[in-house]
Image (cartoon, rainbow, N blue to C red):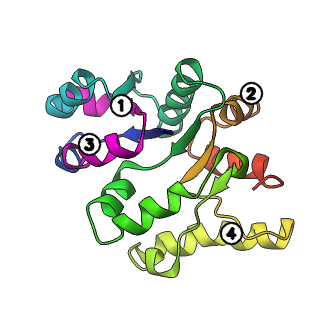
């Protein structure tokens, strides 16, 4: 079974209940989940922090005070690389999108889709559909799809540079980390730029 990775930012406890509900499903379909816990979550949401830290399914890392969201992802990616097996698949995801999918009507479709991705198919980028985009605020849609349009013009491929779900091997993630220069959320676009000829 593959690994799962997500950054977990939930200082107000809005996502913790969802994570607890998702856990049995995650255990059925993933070997383990690597979780990068934000500093605000550690200080303000003791329930979530204790839940993640006490459960052997989760391999977690903590982040320094005043670190950025980009740094939370990078430190989590480094944890995957340090502790994961090189040929193992890892699903890079967002915890809120996982909750939306696994605790809603798209669960079966999602689980069928991810089963189809094998090692030889990676890197594999999931694109957001028009139905998915309809759940986003209009300003998010406008800003994020601009990069997709620009990528189509520049590279001749339709790629989501502000992606929510990417599957690759730990080895591929290791190679990416050696080339990533950004420290903020630009890492998402940089990763797709570096992978654009392989996706």
Left/right placement of residue 44 relative to residue 165 reads left
Residue at figure coordinates x 76%, y 32% from the top left: 179
- Mark 1 or mark 2, which has the lower sequence index? 1
Say which residue label 1 marks: 37
Residue position for label 4: 148
- Taking the magenta stretch, the answer to whether it contains residue 137 is no
When the figure is inspected, residue 145 is found, relative to residue 95, above or below; the finding is below
Sequence order check: which comes first, mark 3 or mark 1?
A: 3
Q: Closer to the camera: disc 3 or disc 4?
A: 3
Q: Residue at x 42, y 40 (%)?
A: 30
Q: Are marks 2 and 3 in contact (CB under 8 Å)?
A: no
Distance (Cα) linking label 3 and label 1: 16 Å
Instruction: Please give the name of the residue rendered at 55% of the width and 39% of the height, measured from the top-left corner.
Output: 90
**Residues in magenta?**
19-43
Q: Return the disc, 3 or 4, that comes first in the chain's sequence.
A: 3
In the picture of the structure, the residue carrying the numbered disc 3 is: 23
Q: Distance between the residues labelled 1 and 4?
A: 29 Å
> How would you rate the neighbour count of disc 2 (Cα within 10 Å): few for under 14, some for 14-19, many for 20 or more?
few
CA gap, disc 1 to disc 2? 23 Å
As drawn, the label of residue 183 is: none
Q: Which sits in the foreground, 60 or 155?
A: 60
């Amino acid at each position: 079974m593959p690994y799962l990775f997500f950054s977990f930012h939930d200082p107000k406890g809005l996502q913790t209940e969802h994570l607890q509900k998702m856990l049995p499903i995650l255990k059925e379909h993933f070997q383990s989940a690597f979780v990068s816990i934000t500093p605000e979550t550690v200080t303000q949401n003791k329930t979530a922090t204790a839940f993640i830290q006490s459960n052997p399914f989760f391999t977690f890392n903590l982040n320094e005070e005043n670190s950025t969201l980009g740094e939370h992802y990078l430190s989590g990616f480094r944890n995957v690389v340090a502790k994961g097996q090189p040929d193992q698949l890892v699903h890079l995801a967002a915890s809120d999108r996982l909750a939306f999918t696994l605790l809603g009507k798209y669960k079966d479709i999602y689980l069928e889709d991810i089963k189809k991705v094998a090692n030889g198919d990676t890197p594999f980028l999931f694109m957001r559909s028009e139905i998915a985009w309809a759940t986003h605020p209009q300003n998010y849609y406008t800003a994020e799809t601009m990069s997709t349009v620009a990528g189509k013009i520049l590279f001749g491929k339709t790629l989501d540079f502000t992606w929510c779900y990417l599957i690759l091997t730990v080895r591929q993630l290791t190679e990416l980390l050696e080339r990533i220069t950004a420290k903020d959320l630009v890492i998402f676009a940089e990763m797709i730029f570096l992978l654009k000829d392989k996706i």
